[in-house]
Image: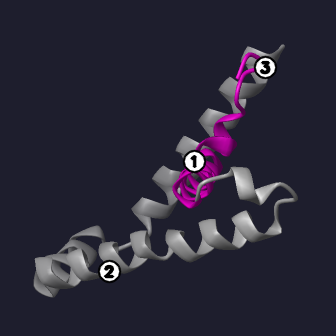
Amino acid sequence: MNKWIAGVGILISLLLLVWILSRSDVHGAMDHVHRLGWTHWLAGAAIYLCAFLPRGLRWKLMLPDSNRLPSGCATRIVVIGYAANNVLPFRLPAWC
């Protein structure tokens, strides 16, 4: 039953993706991406990745026994949480 539900979820996601891409100007969007240049993309990626540091520190302060938790570990946990949110539509199996 779980495999059936996961398969239906993936099928719906793929159909919606095809429908959205068929109604959008992919070549125009890629042209804008190329015209922006690598420096802007690298700067944006650096800002995005550096934003995880204050989030990790915030979680370290909110946790009850935060003296035993290093700041780097808290930041890694936040990054893992964001990564897990990217796969939630695929309905993780029960063994995860």
The amino acid type found where label 3 is placed reads Ala
Q: Residues within 10 Å of mark 1 (few under 14, many from 20)?
A: few
Secondary-structure class at tag 1: helix
Q: Which mark is residue 1?
A: none
Upstream in sequence: badge 2 or badge 1: 2
Q: Which residue is mark 1?
A: 80
Upstream in sequence: badge 3 or badge 1: 1
Q: Which residues are magenta?
A: 71-96
Q: Which mark is residue 44?
A: 2
The amino acid type found where label 2 is placed reads Gly
Q: Is residue 95 magenta?
A: yes
Residue 6, x across and y down, in percent: 71, 26
Q: Which mark is residue 94?
A: 3
Q: Residue at x 51, y 53 (%)?
A: 17
Q: Is residue 78 above or below residue 49?
A: above
**Front residue of 82 and 64:** 64
